[in-house]
Image (spheres, rainbow, N blue to C red):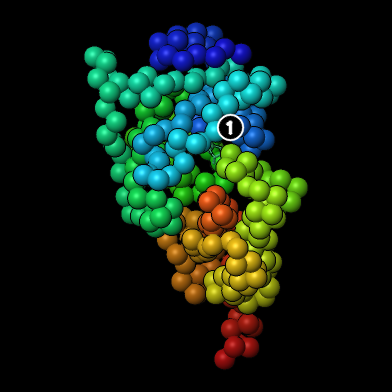
Amino acid sequence: MQIVHSNAELAEAVANARAQGKRIGFVPTMGALHDGHLSLVRIAQEQAEFTVVSIFVNPLQFGAGEDFEKYPRTLESDAEKLKTVGADLVYAPSAREIYADESGVIDQSVKQSAGAAGQGFEGAIRPGHFDGMLTVVARLFDLVKPDVAVFGAKDAQQLFLVRQLAERDYPSLAIVKAPIVREPSGLAMSSRNRYLSASEHQTAQSLSRSLRAGEAASRVAGASASSVLAAAQQVMAEVPEAKLDYLALVDQSTFAPVAEDFAGHALLLIAARIGTTRLLDNQEIVIEQPTTSLLGARE
Ligand code: AMP
């Protein structure tokens, strides 16, 4: 496994792989890797013969007062983990490498706009976050030139927006969704879980519990958006230490909140602050079309 820091070395390694007829799989990360990230690498390896993992804590996607400075930077242990799963290339650039143009001038202005689907939820709580995320993702796509890029379902709104970006600007690039990897407790793995104390870790488990309650409610005959949300909300109401930012049910195809009569594939989204740590999670929910007999029973 090769570790490179410059765009020139990245371009050379990718060109060599291409010359051997290999397809390029890409997994963008901010490092502090856990089993969730490694699952993305495995998926990339199934889709392509040469896997590039980038490790870059992107200043553009952090707001003032967020954890950019303290975000864990653990390149050595990240590289060890990536070696164990057989990644081919680790690209760990500096901000200069990412944001400087050919003449060396650094331009850290935002180049992408997340649009309507980027305004709610994370976009509302972290203004500018998605514009910064999309700016670096587009830059990374331009540098790595992958055939396939793998993103985690855990960051559902990010995945939705990256898909929109790819459909518009990178039509030959396949975006692959990787399922959420969880700890045995149910807590979705996150680089930020390491900030949690033992008691906060307990509290954090309420997020996945709440999603499971929502999912269970969706399986009950006659389930609706409000019955799913009520079941999920009930769990969170019992855990006041978790400060809910949002709990919402959105249409998977639009990322807009669903109406009460919605039927189809939805995502139950949750974000909460536990102490000073913000955590996200989500769960796919299917709400069945009400059957005629149920409609009759309601009348
Ligand atoms: P990050 O380093 O947090 O920016 O994440 C890099 C990629 O890993 C993103 O596509 C995330 O959605 C994905 N990811 C993070 N945590 C998980 C997880 N628990 N399961 C699956 N994918 C994840």
Tell me which residue sits at (54%, 49%) in the image.
277
Tell me where residue 94 sits by quadrant.
top left
Question: Depth check: 211 or 45 in front?
Answer: 211
In this view, the residue farthest toward the right is: 184
Question: Depth check: 73 or 21 in front?
Answer: 73
Residue type pointed to by label 1: Ala
| 38 displayed left or right of 111 | right
Question: Depth check: 192 or 174 in front?
Answer: 192
Residue 190 makes an appearance in the image:
no
Disc 1: residue Cβ within 8 A of ligand 1's nearest atom = yes
Q: Position of residue 237 (x, y in %)?
A: 61, 71
> Which residue corresponds to mark 1?
32
Q: Quadrant of ligand 1?
A: top right
Asked if 162 appears above or below 73 in the picture, the reply is below
Tell me which residue sits at (37%, 19%) in the image.
97
| 135 displayed left or right of 85 | left
Tell me where residue 176 sits by quadrant.
top right
The quadrant of the picture occupied by the N terminus is top right
Q: Position of residue 146 (x, y in %)?
A: 47, 24
